[in-house]
Image (cartoon, rainbow, N blue to C red):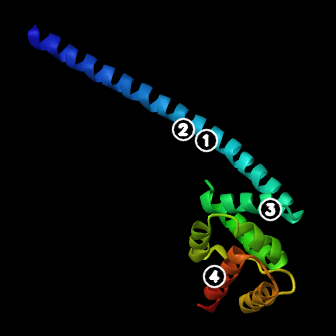
Amino acid sequence: MSTFVSGKAIKGIHLLLIILFLIFACSDDRVNQANTQRTPNEEERMKKEYDLALSQAQNNDATGLLKLYQIASEGQSAEMSEIARDKLAQFLYSNSELWVRTFSRTDLDKFKNYLRKGGLAVLDLPKGVASEEQYKEEILKKLKKIKGEEKEKELIQFIFQLFQR
């Protein structure tokens, strides 16, 4: 009779383990579902921040450029970071003076490191620009015309060096 009791005990333990496994598996799914429900909200928030920054930058507001830089360098979404990086490079082309003035006032070493890592790479060339080479040449022409302070000149010189590589 003792083997019969131990057999029932083993079956009970197996049943208990299966029930515990199912409970933990289902609760893990609920946690994952909660995380995916938050992700669209975070993406929506990031998109709104990006849209606001883009609007500010298009209105010649340095705050927008700085926010785009923050999204490009520290963004939580790789896609949003790439889009912001591309827009920053396009703003260098379209509003070089504001761009240089704004970023010369940031931590220049940190910003130079960002530029070294591809911060000036452009995915979509501005209208009327046929090649990346033409894009660089036109930016360099615009930068040559800027008469700035010491930090602005330092940043301009650094961009010249990057484009000559």
- Mark 3: secondary structure: helix
Residue tagged 3: 62
- Give the residue type that dot 2 points to: Asn
Mark nearer the N terminus (4 vs 3): 3
Residue 131, placed above or below residue 63: below
Would residue 60 appear left or right of 74 to someone viewing this image? right
Q: Residues within 10 Å of mark 2 (few under 14, many from 20)?
A: few
Q: Nearer the viewer, mark 4 or mark 1?
A: 4
Q: Residue at x 57, y 69 (%)?
A: 109
Q: Nearer the viewer, mark 3 or mark 2?
A: 3
Q: Residue at x 44, y 32 (%)?
A: 25
Label 4, label 3: how many angstroms apart (C-alpha)? Answer: 20 Å
**Residue 162 quadrant:** bottom right
Circles 2 and 1, Cβ within 8 Å, touching? The answer is yes
Residue tagged 1: 36
Q: Residue at x 75, y 88 (%)?
A: 140
Q: Residue at x 21, y 15 (%)?
A: 9
Q: Nearer the viewer, mark 4 or mark 2?
A: 4
- Give the residue type that dot 1 points to: Thr
Residue 139, placed above or below residue 90: below
Label 2, label 1: how many angstroms apart (C-alpha)? Answer: 6 Å
- Mark 1: secondary structure: helix
- Give the residue type that dot 4 points to: Phe
